[in-house]
Amino acid sequence: MIKKLLTAVLCLSLVLASVSFSFASEESASDINATANFKCTELTEAQAIKRLSEIAGISLEDAATKIKTNKNSTMRLENSVRAVSYQEYSYTKSAGAGYKVEVGCLAIMGIGCGHSQFDGIVEDSVYSMATGSGPYTWNEGYSSANILNKGQLQLNARGTIEINYTTTVSATLKGKLIDAGFSTTNDHYFRKAVSINKTKTLSWWNN
């Protein structure tokens, strides 16, 4: 009797372990999918200056001044002497047919208490852009980055991808564009509006 009871308990333990493993695997897959389109790049101050120069179209000297001003004002606002680092956060969304839209910014990160947190956004560092092939244009409506709290950053963008199909777009690509939801007009352009509104949550943040 005792042997049968022990066998039953062992079987039940194995079943519960299997169920737990299944739930854990599903949760991990969900987490990966939720953050797959976010990218974070750690930058030194020199790299942040160069990247801001590229994004804002300003000289390295002007970019260095902005970086220094932003860092100092952020530290005064936070009343902190913590170390500061820079990270570029971006989110990429597929528009279909091989075209993508990206929105991003340079974030000032405060380091302390075993983790980093969002302390500020570098002035003029928010951008949006499209990538793809052929003669396309990204007409930005707006782009923005907002710190919701110390552990969350929101990226927003809206605009229209515009593709001239008079001579250079193949029939195959035209079919893909139509399937992806691009509309055509009498002025020989494919167009598609794309909106992004996504929030990056740091791993330590717990609502």
Image: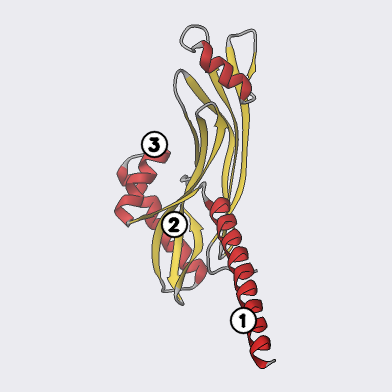
From mark 3 to mark 1, how far is it between C-alphas?
67 Å
- Residue tagged 3: 57
**Few, some or many C-alpha atoms within 10 Å of disc 2 (few <14, some 14-19, many ≥20)?**
some
Mark closer to the observer (3, 1): 1
Mark before the other along the chain sequence, 2 or 1: 1
Where is the C terminus found, in terms of image quarters? bottom right
Percent across and percent down for residue 138 are 52, 27
- Residue tagged 2: 70
From mark 3 to mark 2, how far is it between C-alphas?
18 Å
Of helix, strand and loop, which one carries label 3? loop
Above or below, 153 relative to 144? below
Of helix, strand and loop, which one carries label 1? helix
> Which residue is depicted at the point 60% across and 69% down?
18
**Few, some or many C-alpha atoms within 10 Å of disc 3 (few <14, some 14-19, many ≥20)?**
few
Three-letter amino acid code at the position of disc 3: Gly
Mark before the other along the chain sequence, 3 or 1: 1
- Residue tagged 1: 10
